[in-house]
Amino acid sequence: MKRVAVVGATGAVGTELRCVLAQREFPAESYRLFASARSAGRRIDWVDGPLTVAELGPHSFDDVDLAFFSAGASISREYAPLAREAGAIVIDNSSAFRMDRDVPLVIPEINAKAVRSHNGILAVPNCSTIIMAVVLWPLHRVHPIRRVVVCTYQAISGAGARALAELESQTADVLAGRPPTPHVLPVPCAFNVFSHNTPIGEDGYNVEESKMIAETRKIFGDDTLRIAPTCMRVPVRRVHTEALSIEFETPITEQDAREILGTAPGLEILDDRAANRFPTPLAAEGRDEVYVGRIRCDPTIPDGRGLQLICAGDQLRKGAALNAVQIAELLSPGSAASERKRGPT
């Protein structure tokens, strides 16, 4: 994967993607950065010197081996097939191909083997799905899961760089006594909690919630898994927190869960009851790991088959950019991080 392109290089995920590629010393002979006409010509500092952002076009992928897409579903649908036709492997962060039967939906800690069957495009799951799934999977392998009720408290970064800027400006407005005016999100995001800003279907579930159900089933290879999500936005910069209530087929103790989660790849337990220290957005921001804690039995589920916990993961990092780079590392054995433990292969 010597020649690498980053599409959406100036957006929130694209910026984090560039950071992760540099930090993990991903092996590449050259990089090309693409964005919209608005960002074309911008100079960005890179490991070996500054690079100029180019406007994305139909011939952008000539002589490209690997293309990371982080520019939204419509761009991916238009340009990812062109990149594949030009000979590049595409790793896509959008929702465009996730549920395509011929496109692997990959979390390396869970289903690394899936990269072997790609047809030129691989998909990164939704951020809320990733953060939940890396916690559920190691438990599910030992104690099969029947049902999950999940409530998410999702960061503003999931709505993009403009939404992040809006959070900052609205926070300043409120603190100065000015009314916050929403432009990117449907309601004020500063000092507010509201239902996730995706359309709601006839079943009453919004798109984010439907993604968590369908994507988790695809990744786990289990269409019978029952998942009941409620997705909310909270005034947090870039870390999603999720509260999980899990029903298992067999009894599970707190100690069982701690032992399983404590050795699982991509996780870190933060569960200090005496000090009241548990996963928080501030603790997880900028970290590769998903934090998990508040591990306790659910007394409302009989026979010791219930567990409750919370987890927190950086939406821009493990929820998007890092997961994409980890997929690329599975395709590039020569990468500096290729021997790191990342689950079943």
Image (cartoon, grey):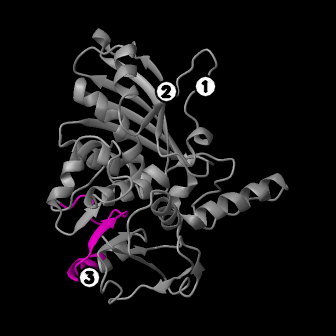
Give the residue number, with chain letter if any, for mark 3.
82
Q: Quadrant of the C terminus?
A: top left
Q: Label 2 near label 1: C-beta < 8 Å?
A: yes
The earlier-in-sequence mark between 3 and 2 is 3
Q: Which residues are magenta?
A: 80-100
Instruction: Report how far apart the C-alphas of labels 3 and 2 lie in the structure.
Output: 44 Å
Percent of width and height locating residue 264: 35, 32
Q: Earlier in the sequence, mark 1 or mark 2?
A: 1
**Percent position (x, y) of residue 14?**
48, 67
Residue wearing tag 2:
293
Q: Give amino acid for label 2.
A: Gly
* The image quarter in which residue 41 lies: bottom right
Kind of residue at disc 1? Arg
Q: Quadrant of the N terminus?
A: bottom left
Q: Residues within 10 Å of mark 1 (few under 14, many from 20)?
A: few
On screen, residue 52 above or below 70: below
Q: Give amino acid for label 3.
A: Leu
Using the image as rendered, state which of residue 206 and residue 321 is in the foreground: 321
Residue 259 visible (yes or no): yes
Could you tell me if residue 206 is visible in this image? no
